[in-house]
């Protein structure tokens, strides 16, 4: 490690964030011809180290003899100050090289509130912010992840964007980069060749147009770039590459455990859920593969916990068998199991019971909306009876805290729906009192603000204003103020900014750059979030943020993300929106007929279930 | 003999910035990887039965950290040592071991002193031998100690037992434990050397034997 860096470390908080040397970190020599890529997570080490996608990509790249993958995270503010004072650039953990020395810098875009951090990392890494300012020999700056499906706010900063799942396309990208490195291609040629890979979007090859009112009208491709970029998808998850080892951090990081992805995709069709639309179709891993992956990861990491993660783990058609077998295999070794998300039904409670025989701290359910009417609108297939049955089971089995997740600001919401949240919470508490002995039951209600996302049936909807949301929060706070119930609400200013970027366009680049110059970063951290500086940046750039957030879009208007498709058609989304407004449900295509989202035909894939018992 | 094993291990340069909790987590995972038959506590949160001596400050390396492991069945110290050394991450190394007799007093309760070596990264402006004489001759050595409740003015002279200057390093033997604890950087602060300009290594943890002589935590159990 650089001597100057060693001098700094004793003076910063948690220096182990920056020291490298974790178990199973991969250190490769920098062969002159190998492609060097640094995987950049635009947030703190403790957050980024929990990301499963990057673990997979890190493994895949390092398995290649002709490529190197390293890691970098955004240092905390004290460390940034020290680096600047010592005139040191941001470096990767493994080799300690500046970001500017890599061939490829790959960012993952997990949430909108990390965009300022991405700019900050480019600054600290010594890389020109904008793609037009990068020169021959500068790194290729790419990005992927869920927010890559509307990358327009970042279009000026990213050389290319990977749309969809990374396992296969990463090889194609590395192959092109390697070839261009050998042939010493010009930067423009490299981008042109990358643009030929299905699933790669090169923002600088497109020009945006706006109408007189200032609304986005279209994105015109240049340089023979494709008009539409279709997401990449792994047809068979069971044979997809998966790490046998994880880098084991020393620090206490999020999701610090063995993680296996039991399935990918979800066809339940919740209309607010972007992930549900983006990751279709459903592909399950086999019990055999999962058990093999877990055994290897447990052996190499020594973790005491295994998490079965996915968008809806309880939906895996063999989850019952899987859980029983894992409990039998690992119970005696001091290794526990956890499920990432539970459905609202008694089957899920039984699963949780099997897993948490002892440690019954809290169970979480997400009815999302307070009334059946609104749950029909959002297509959340949970009936009031399901919730009551599930919590009865939970309290009887020994849990004493139940957490309930809701959203406010959903389309068509009225006071009745807020009252519905109150009624549900109160009834759950009542059930708790009836079914629980000595320990006092409690209900924790968590209320998020609905932020309409691109590529969903609600992409046309206006987001509630901050005033509306605050009013609703105050209403709930008043109605839910009673012993045994706690209420936690999301910060409305954060939801507002998230709303701006979720459906933003290229004109936000200036705002973003200005906000970072003013000192904005770590916007997801309440102690760092500077709404005032953000508003100053909008004002200085003469961009009205409200236009992106509260405005209801007309059904004909173009979206800045129309050139990117998840395979689910805009026609289907529009139809779903109408069905929503008619308060009607759309069934899950795994158990009923095809709902016509078109993902299977567009991508030539299909739902792949392991055909165990099915629990709708 | 019980099924307990006492281990001495080093915490080297690659891992010197780990906190005590980070070390604990690392050891727990290494034990799981080693498949050693560690005993678990009863109750809702079964925990491996590991006990450490006094925590090492972040940034300090050590040649002499100690831990006691309770096993489910008898495993020799050498076996434990070898099993762990094959799975521990770089920077950690088990250097010695001994079996624990029944009802051994805990490390926490017996360790009373520690020896540190302070190596100065920049050429020092003072004469080492002279400084040692002055410090030892002082009646009081006042420092500002940072505690959770704030900064406290404190006399550390009673906690300093031995000072030696040798090979351009300062060797400090002082109180270590829950009642009294000398922080090695407090000595360097008296010499107006910044914390980032000194490399500290813990050389040994010490236990008073029946005759009042300082011995190591392993000597204590090996003698029995």
Image: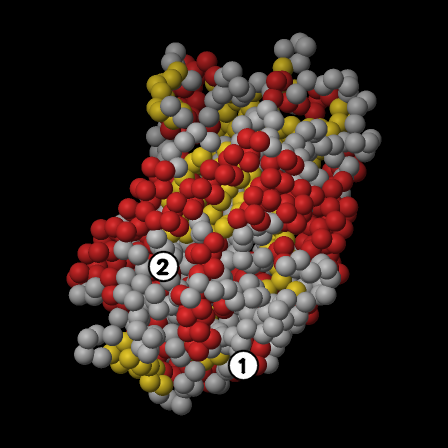
Whole-percent x and y of residue A385?
A: 56, 47
Which chain's residue wears label 2? A
Task: Give the chain letter at badge 1.
Answer: A
* Residue at which label 2 appears: A412
Query: Would you say residue B129 is visible in this rendering?
Result: no
Of circles 2 and 1, which is in front?
2
First in sequence: mark 2 or mark 1? 2
Do dots 2 and 1 share one subunit? yes
Residue A313 x, y percent position in the rendering? 62, 56
- The quadrant the N terminus of chain B occupies is top right
* Residue at screen point 40% across, 25% down: B147
As drawn, A536 above or below A475? below
* Badge 2 vs badge 1, beta-carbon distance below 8 Å: no
Residue drawn 21% across and 74% down? A214
Residue found farthest to the top? B211
Residue closest to the eye, A204 or A12: A204
Q: Residue drawn 38% across and 74% down?
A: A561
Residue holding disc 1: A602
Q: Give the color scheme: rainbow, by chain, secondary structure or one colour.
A: secondary structure
Q: Position of residue A609 (x, y in %)?
A: 68, 67
């Amino acid at each position: 490690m650089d001597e100057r860096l060693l001098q700094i470390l004793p003076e910063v908080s948690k220096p182990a964030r920056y020291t490298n040397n974790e178990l199973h970190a991969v250190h490769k020599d920098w062969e002159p011809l190998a492609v060097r890529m640094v995987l950049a997570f635009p947030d703190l080490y403790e957050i980024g180290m929990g990301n499963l996608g990057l673990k997979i990509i890190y493994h895949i790249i390092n398995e290649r003899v002709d490529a190197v993958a390293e890691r970098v995270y955004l240092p905390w503010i004290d460390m940034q100050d020290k680096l600047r004072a010592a005139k040191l650039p941001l470096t990767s953990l493994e080799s300690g090289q500046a970001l500017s020395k890599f061939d490829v810098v790959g960012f993952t875009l997990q949430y909108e509130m990390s965009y300022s951090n991405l700019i900050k990392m480019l600054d600290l890494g010594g890389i020109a912010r904008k793609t037009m300012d990068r020169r021959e020999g500068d790194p290729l700056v790419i990005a992927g992840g869920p927010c890559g499906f509307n990358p327009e706010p970042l279009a000026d900063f990213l050389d290319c964007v990977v749309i969809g799942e990374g396992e296969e396309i990463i090889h194609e990208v590395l192959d092109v980069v390697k070839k261009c490195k050998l042939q010493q291609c010009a930067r423009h040629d490299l981008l042109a060749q990358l643009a030929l890979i299905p699933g790669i979007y090169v923002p600088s090859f497109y020009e945006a147009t706006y109408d007189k009112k200032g609304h986005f009208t279209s994105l015109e491709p240049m340089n023979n770039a494709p008009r539409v970029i279709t997401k990449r998808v792994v047809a068979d998850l069971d044979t997809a590459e998966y790490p046998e080892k994880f880098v084991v951090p020393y620090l206490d990081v999020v999701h610090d455990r063995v993680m296996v992805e039991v399935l990918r995709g979800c066809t339940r069709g919740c209309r607010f859920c972007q992930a549900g639309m983006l990751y279709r179709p459903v592909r399950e891993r086999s019990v055999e593969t999962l058990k093999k992956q877990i055994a290897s990861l447990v052996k190499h990491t020594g973790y005491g916990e295994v998490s079965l993660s996915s968008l809806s783990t309880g939906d895996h058609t063999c989850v019952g068998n899987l859980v029983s077998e894992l409990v039998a295999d690992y119970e005696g070794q001091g290794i526990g199991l956890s499920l990432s998300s539970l459905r609202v039904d008694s089957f899920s409670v039984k699963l949780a019971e099997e897993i948490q025989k002892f440690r019954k701290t809290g169970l979480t359910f997400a009815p999302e909306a307070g009334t059946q009417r609104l749950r029909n609108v959002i297509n959340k297939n949970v009936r009031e009876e399901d919730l009551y049955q599930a919590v009865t089971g939970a309290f009887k089995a020994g849990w004493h805290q139940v957490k309930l997740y809701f959203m406010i600001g959903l389309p068509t919401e009225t006071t009745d729906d807020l009252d519905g949240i109150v009624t549900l919470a109160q009834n759950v508490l009542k059930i708790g009192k009836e079914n629980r002995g000595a320990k006092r039951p409690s209900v924790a209600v968590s209320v998020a603000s609905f932020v309409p996302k691109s590529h969903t049936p609600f992409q046309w909807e206006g987001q509630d204003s901050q005033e509306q949301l605050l009013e609703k929060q105050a209403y709930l706070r008043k109605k839910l103020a009673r012993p045994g119930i706690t209420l936690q609400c999301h910060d409305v200013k954060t939801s507002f900014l998230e709303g701006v970027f979720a459906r933003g366009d290229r004109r936000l680049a200036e705002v973003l750059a200005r906000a970072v110059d003013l000192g904005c970063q770590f916007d997801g951290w309440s102690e760092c979030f500077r709404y005032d500086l953000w508003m100053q940046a909008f004002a200085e750039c003469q961009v009205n943020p409200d236009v992106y957030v509260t405005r209801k879009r007309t059904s004909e208007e173009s979206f800045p993300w129309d050139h990117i498709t998840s395979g689910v058609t805009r026609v289907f989304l529009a139809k779903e929106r109408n069905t929503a407004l008619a308060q009607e449900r759309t069934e899950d295509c795994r158990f009923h007929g095809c709902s016509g989202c078109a993902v299977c035909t567009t991508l030539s894939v299909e739902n792949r279930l392991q055909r165990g018992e099915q629990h709708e | 003999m019980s099924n307990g094993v006492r281990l001495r291990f080093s915490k080297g340069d690659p891992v010197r910035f780990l906190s005590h909790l980070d070390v604990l987590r690392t050891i727990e995972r290494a034990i799981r990887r080693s498949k050693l038959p560690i005993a678990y506590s009863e109750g809702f949160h079964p925990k491996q039965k590991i006990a450490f001596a006094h925590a090492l400050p972040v940034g300090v390396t050590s040649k002499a950290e100690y831990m006691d492991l309770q096993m489910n069945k008898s495993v020799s110290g050498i076996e434990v040592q070898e099993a762990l050394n094959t799975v521990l991450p770089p920077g950690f190394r088990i250097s010695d071991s001994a079996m624990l007799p029944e009802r051994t007093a805990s490390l926490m309760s017996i360790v009373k002193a520690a020896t540190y070596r302070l190596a100065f990264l920049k050429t020092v402006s003072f004469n080492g031998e002279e400084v040692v004489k002055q410090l030892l001759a002082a009646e009081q050595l006042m420092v500002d100690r940072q505690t959770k409740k704030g900064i406290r003015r404190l006399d550390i002279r009673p906690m300093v037992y031995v000072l030696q200057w040798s090979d351009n390093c300062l060797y400090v033997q002082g109180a270590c434990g829950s009642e009294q604890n000398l922080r090695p950087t407090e000595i360097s602060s008296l010499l107006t050397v910044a914390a980032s300009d000194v490399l500290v290594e813990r050389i040994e943890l010490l236990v008073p034997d029946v005759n009042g002589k300082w011995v190591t935590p392993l000597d204590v159990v090996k003698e029995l």
